[in-house]
Amino acid sequence: MHQDPLHHSGRRLRDYEEAIHAIGHGDFGVEVKVHHDDDPEVVRLGLALRDMARSLDRTFRETRELSRITAQVNAGLLLDDALEYVYGAFRELIPYDRIGLSLIDRTGRHVEARWARSEAAEMQITRGYSAALAGSSLEDILRTGKPRILNDLPEYLDQHPDSDSTRLIVAEGMRSSLTCPLVVKGRPVGFLFFSSQQAGTYAGVHADLFMKLASSLSVIVDKSRLYQELVELDGLKNRFLGMAAHDLRNPLASILSLLQLLRKGRFGAVADKQAEVLDRLRERSLTMLDLIEQLLDVNVIETGHLNLDTVQLDAVTHLRRELDDLQPMAADKGIELVLEAPGNSHPFVHADPHRLGQVVTNLVTNAIKFSCPGTQVTCRVQAQGAETCISVEDQGQGIPAAEVETLFTEFARTSVRPTGGERSTGLGLAIVRRIVEAHGGRVEVDSEVGRGSIFRVRLPAAPLA
């Protein structure tokens, strides 16, 4: 017994209604079944619905991947990482066996290969390959701002035998290509090349997705260039600081030596007033020398040349030695400098004695500078699990919470001022953090306005040898 065709059509229409409902709720992967023995009108409806669902599903996946690219660009992903992601993520959406990116050099005269990935056994065009822009077909792409599709690269090479880049890409095994211009704020910066090992791959494609992808990558290309320029400027700054500091340190050391000889009367008797001036000159010169030494430390750290000569150190003994040297500074300001340490067991650390001494000196000196007379600065050493903790606590002014985050950056200044008019370079804590991190440790700070601050240095503990 045969069922009424209207019954089949009615059931199919209900299926299509459910599919439309699913699509409306974002389920673009819904399966739309088409039975060709249905009523022709129902078949046409089913085919149209299936095509729409597939088109929407494809558009959704394309948009999702483009959104991911955009998010990664905004998150500061490096150019090479973004391109590697594109190469893997877009293979199901757009056809290619090779992606290459080339940038226009700063003169605007040449195009240089920046990055490429290929399924070919050996790539012929790799990073560093360069070609003149003037008179090339790429110049036409920049002028029109539209992508170029070549569906038969060998044929194009026959027509343009002087095209070295086409000859190389054909030798790599590519037979068709799609080239998109990369434009940032109306300024052309390069090209994105999609290539396929099959001829005619791009004959029927819509170039919109390729251009959207190129547009997203244009942003990170520009960011990458700016980042590279910042890196170069930062390197130039470090070299300048290093040279300037070295050139200043030697004559300043000579000045200090001469001041000391003058003060001791080696060149004749010194009157009281003259002695006072010489002492002030020496004090200022020492301040300058301290700044130069800190600039040199920053330069060494920034350029990655901080070499640590680590040994096993008794943290308590080392800290006590450093504090003995700082006692006169604390006494001059009427501040009590106290060391609290465990009585029997002394925590050990693997550290560079000189660099750890810098850390302690910077932290204690800061505590003294920002504390009032009659207060106390307490240094503690404690073993805490796998770490040795060295802390410096003062009863000073404290640091506003909003300013704590900036403490460890170069030339950082807070609203808190030294209580005795002492000078501060803003480099000490930045150096502390870098030295501690080079030892595999970390620095923490707790501070409350009006109640003082605690700086903690946590270093990996070393077992007693």
Image (tube, grey):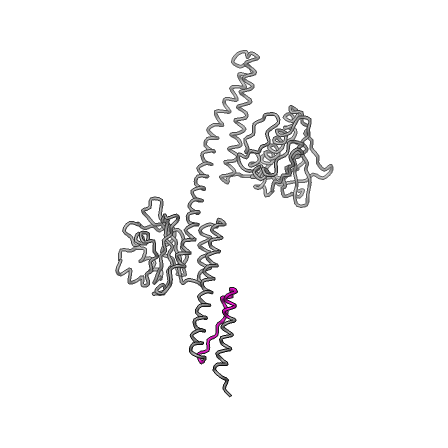
Residue at the farthest right position: 343
Image quadrant for the C terminus? top right
Frontmost residue, 279 versus 111: 111
Q: At which x and y percent is residue 386?
A: 66, 45
Q: At which x and y percent is residue 411?
A: 53, 34
Q: Is residue 264 above or below residue 443?
A: above
Name which quarter of the figure residue 369 lies in. top right
Q: Is residue 45 above or below residue 319?
A: below
Tell me if residue 440 can be seen. Answer: yes
Please state if 338 lies on the left or on the right of 22 as rendered: right
**Count of marks, rendered view:** 0
Residue appearing at x 29%, y 60% in the figure: 156
Q: At which x and y percent is residue 417?
A: 59, 29
The prevailing secondary structure element of the residues shown in magenta is loop
Tell me if residue 318 can be seen. Answer: no
Is residue 451 part of the magenta span, yes or no? no
Is residue 30 part of the magenta span, yes or no? yes
Residue appearing at x 52%, y 65% in the figure: 25
Residue appearing at x 49%, y 76% in the figure: 12
Q: At which x and y percent is residue 226?
A: 43, 44
Q: Which stretch did the figure color magenta?
A: 19-37
Please state if 383 lies on the left or on the right of 187 as rendered: right
Please state if 155 lies on the left or on the right of 8 as rendered: left
Frontmost residue, 391 versus 267: 391
Q: In this view, does 99 lie above or below 417?
A: below
Residue at the farthest bottom position: 1
Frontmost residue, 366 versus 361: 366
